[in-house]
Amino acid sequence: MKILYTCLLLSSLLLTSCFEYEEELSLVQYGSRDYALSGVLQEDWGAHSGDHYNMDFTIIGETSVFEENQNALGETYFTLSEDFDCYLFTEFFSPGKEGFQEGTFTALGNRKLSEAEGEFVYRRVQFGRSLEEAIFGENGTITIVITSKGVYRMKYDILMENGRKLEGTFIGTPQYLDRK
């Protein structure tokens, strides 16, 4: 009986681990299609407009690649590979000047950033399946959790300008670019 109980306990733990892993896949749904996400570029713009800290994130699909380049001054910049399936760009503002903070971000809308003092807001969400396509978010929430190891978990629930929903989660460690 003890062996049977131990086997059931181990099976339960393994199944729970598998289900938790499935929940942690980086995936976004737009319309009726799912897009697997693979990488993220984090652009740190620093303190911005009084009491906010500005950070931009560009998340790319599984067939996409960020290509690292340098300009004539030796400054690093990234371009997106020519062949890609999707991208998701978001411009975030967290309260405070000392650094970017995790939280639940809502749309800034038509307000000025100075009118959102102490709030977690995003100014722009943009989704596309090509460089020519840019579908903008109207409203919704994006929750960001940052682990102690620098892994970001970003959960999107956005109504886009064309009335479709963009929902999903990205989990990963960003490529960091200091723009301050």
Image (cartoon, helix red, strand yellow):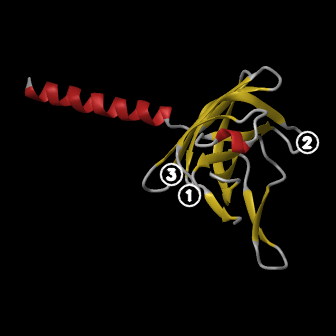
Secondary structure beneath dot 2 equals loop
Q: Residue furthest left?
A: 1
Which is nearer the N-term, disc 2 or disc 3? 2
Tell me, yes or no, if residue 99 can be seen here: yes
Q: Quadrant of residue 71?
A: bottom right
Residue occupying the point 29% across, 32% down: 13
Q: What's the distance in space between the residues labelled 2 and 1, CA to CA?
A: 33 Å
Give whichever of 1, 101 is nearer the camera: 101
Kindly identify the amino acid type of the residue bearing the numbered disc 2. Glu
Residue occupying the point 75% across, 32% down: 109
Disc 2 to disc 1: CB gap under 8 Å = no
- Residue 142 at x, y = what percent? 61, 35
Give whichever of 163, 111 is nearer the camera: 111
Disc 2 to disc 3: CB gap under 8 Å = no
Query: Residue at label 3?
Result: 151
Q: Give the answer, above or below, for where 72 lies relative to 122.
A: below
10 Å crowding of disc 2: few (<14), some (14-19), many (20+): few
Q: Which mark is residue 99?
A: 1
Query: Residue at label 2?
Result: 132
Q: What's the distance in space between the residues labelled 2 and 3, CA to CA?
A: 30 Å
Q: Give the answer, above or below, for where 70 lies relative to 16.
A: below
Q: Nearer the viewer, mark 2 or mark 1?
A: 1
Give whichever of 52, 40 is nearer the camera: 52
Secondary structure beneath dot 3 equals loop
- Residue 75 at x, y = what percent? 76, 74
